[in-house]
Image (cartoon, grey):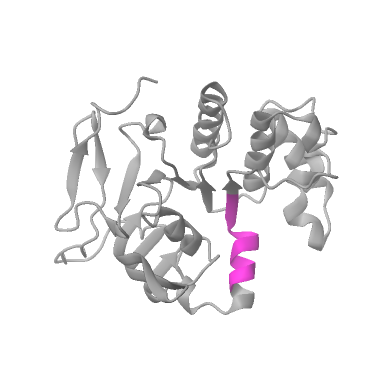
Amino acid sequence: MAADSIAIVSASPRAARPGPRTRELPMIDVRNVHKSYRSGSRMVEALRGISCQIDRGRFAFIVGPSGSGKSSLLYLLGALDRPTSGEILVNGHDLAKMSESRQNLYRRDEIGFIFQSFNLISNLSALENVLVPFMPRGITAEQRRRAADLLAEVGLGDRLDHRPYQLSGGEQQRVAIARALVKQPVLILADEPTGELDSRTGDEIYAILRRMQESSGTTLVIVTHDRRFITPDDLVLEIQDGQLAGSDAAETVDYSAILSPR
């Protein structure tokens, strides 16, 4: 693939290849997924036959206009919703067949979430907010140390005791990033992580995300409408009207003309 191109994954099934499969199984394998819901008296098809794969350790983007279905796909990957039909395999788990209790364990133990609105608890310190995933089972000294180390890595080593109202928007999102990473998840899902931040702070947040994703080796999937953060090495899933762009065949699309300078 050319250095100035980004792969767009097709919605069509991959052609079968002869011989034994030697590549590692993908972290995410979405197979002909549909998602419908009722809005008043009509049914809305949010996703219409999505099929795609994301390999382990990838930095991937889900892009598309508002209402295209990109957040619907992200919520399905996080087991925050169930597909109407189709299969979603994440790290070998079939999410659609999981019981509710198993989905809770999956979200608790294997997934890190980063949301646009940060979702910090106002009466907890930055350190305590990072430790929230461990609170139901009790916090160990090692977990506390790791949380403090992560806050230091995102530039908040001197803000451990600050409450969210004492932090800027960018600092709050850094706390949210540390909280997502503290469990050492196999997958991080981010929904418009810079949507409430100015451009300069957004650049800083993406620099942190890339650095920490590279060091941890986790798979990171981001929903965004802002293509300027995409680089030629990233995987891009472009959704239009509930389907992936290039539904007839896998293709390579040149984004060099529309990506803003870094």
Q: Residue furthest front?
A: 41
Is residue 111 shown in magenta? Answer: yes
> Residue 18 location, x and y as percent?
14, 66
The quarter of the image holding the C terminus is top left
Q: Which residue shows up at 40% across the image and 74% down it? A: 42
> Residue 203 location, x and y as percent?
51, 25
> Residue 83 location, x and y as percent?
43, 72
Q: Is residue 200 left or right of residue 142?
A: left
> Residue 43 location, x and y as percent?
39, 74
Q: Of residues 66 and 84, which is closer to you in this image?
A: 66
The quarter of the picture where residue 103 lies is bottom right
Q: Which residue shows up at 27% across the image and 28% down it? A: 258
Predominant SS along the magenta part: helix
The magenta stretch is 103-113
Q: Of residues 224 and 36, which is closer to you in this image?
A: 36
Q: Is residue 226 left or right of residue 180?
A: left
Question: How many marks do you count on the picture?
Answer: 0
The quarter of the picture where residue 126 lies is top right
Q: Of residues 91 and 99, which is closer to you in this image?
A: 99
Is residue 52 shown in magenta? Answer: no
Q: Which residue shows up at 19% across the image and 57% down it? A: 247
The quarter of the image holding the N terminus is top left
Q: Which residue shows up at 84% across the image and 46% down it? A: 141
